[in-house]
Every structure is written in structure tokens, then in C-alpha cells.
């Protein structure tokens, strides 16, 4: 079983590759879900030290996004809309953060492949 240091190395390699989590995990002894889980876990672990660590591999993968609140009617909580590289993703209350992270990673990877990064 891999430890946190091994996962940090894998995550660093993944982020430097520019591939989606699914593509990076193909043919390896771990899944894209495990990769995203450990990335989130390592980021959370770094939050109490010098602030959040969104990229364990360094500042090369800075992600800029514009968050837009979408107005709704009624008593429900407004969904969250994120625009990244011309793609707008709207998520409702209670969304799965790991899946959302994978979606954002894929948008980022496609933008990088298209030279928009």
C-alpha cells in the first residue's frame, strides 16, 4: 500500500504531465479516483501550515477561474457556476467534490492541449 509520500510523488508527476487523471492512471496500479482523493487529502493536510497547498508539485499548475453565483427563485440555495477556459460548469448544492475536481482537471487538460493555457 502506497504512503502519502508516494502519492505526493504520483500527484506531482500527474500535474506535470498535463493529462487528465483518467489518462494518467491508465495502465497503472491505481485509479483516477484514488489520484483525486489523495490530491485532495494532501491539499487539506497542508492547509494549517502556510495556507492551502492547491498543487503539491509547485506553482506551475495555478488555476484561475471566475466563480459566478446564479440567482434562483424559492427557498433553495443558489447553485455554483464556475467558468474556466470558456467552459461554464454549474453544480447544485450537495455536489460531489471529487467528481467536480476531475471535471475541472479535464477542462484544464483540454485547454492545455489546445494551447489555451
Image (tube, rainbow, N blue to C red):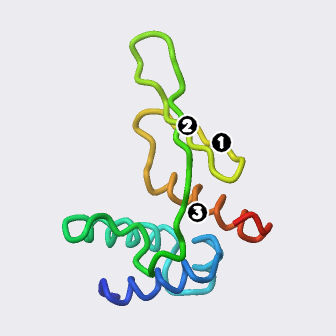
Residue name at image x 30 percent, y 83 percent? 4
Q: CA distance from mark 1 to mark 3?
A: 14 Å
Q: CA distance from mark 3 to mark 2?
A: 16 Å
**Residue 112, x across and y down, in percent:** 71, 69
**Residue 105 numbered mark, or none:** 3
**Residue 23, x across and y down, in percent:** 65, 75
| Image-quadrant location for residue 42 | bottom left
Query: Is label 3 in contact with label 2 (beta carbons under 8 Å)?
Result: no
Say which residue label 2 marks.
81
**Residue 66, x across and y down, in percent:** 56, 44
Query: Is label 2 in contact with label 1 (beta carbons under 8 Å)?
Result: yes
Answer yes or no: is residue 67 visible: yes
* Quadrant of the rendering where the C terminus is positioned: bottom right
Instruction: Compare marks 2 and 1 and give the one earlier in the sequence.
Output: 2
Q: CA distance from mark 2 to mark 1?
A: 7 Å
Instruction: Compare marks 1 and 3 and give the one earlier in the sequence.
Output: 1
* Quadrant of the rendering where the N terminus is positioned: bottom left
| Image-quadrant location for residue 40 | bottom left
Mark 3 neighbour class, 10 Å CA radius: few under 14, some 14 to 19, many 20 or more: many
Residue name at image x 54 percent, y 77 percent? 15
Say which residue label 1 marks.
88
Answer yes or no: is residue 1 visible: no
Q: Secondary structure at mark 2?
A: strand
Q: Is residue 99 left or right of residue 117?
A: left
Q: Secondary structure at mark 1?
A: strand
Q: Secondary structure at mark 3?
A: helix
Vertical placement of residue 21 versus 107, above or below: below
Mark 2 neighbour class, 10 Å CA radius: few under 14, some 14 to 19, many 20 or more: some
Residue name at image x 58 percent, y 37 percent? 90
**Residue 29, x across and y down, in percent:** 50, 86
Q: Is residue 104 left or right of residue 114?
A: left
Amino acid at each position: 500500500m502506497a504512503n502519502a509520500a508516494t502519492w505526493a510523488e504520483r500527484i506531482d508527476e500527474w500535474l506535470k504531465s498535463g493529462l487528465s487523471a483518467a489518462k494518467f492512471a491508465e495502465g497503472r496500479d491505481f485509479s483516477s479516483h484514488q489520484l483525486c482523493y489523495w490530491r485532495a487529502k494532501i491539499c487539506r493536510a497542508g492547509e494549517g501550515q502556510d495556507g492551502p497547498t492547491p498543487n503539491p508539485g509547485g506553482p506551475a499548475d495555478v488555476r484561475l477561474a471566475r466563480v459566478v453565483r446564479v440567482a434562483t427563485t424559492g427557498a433553495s440555495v443558489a447553485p455554483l457556476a464556475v467558468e474556466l477556459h470558456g467552459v461554464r460548469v454549474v453544480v447544485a448544492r450537495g455536489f460531489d467534490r471529487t467528481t467536480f475536481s476531475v471535471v475541472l482537471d479535464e477542462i484544464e487538460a483540454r485547454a492545455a492541449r489546445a494551447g489555451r493555457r
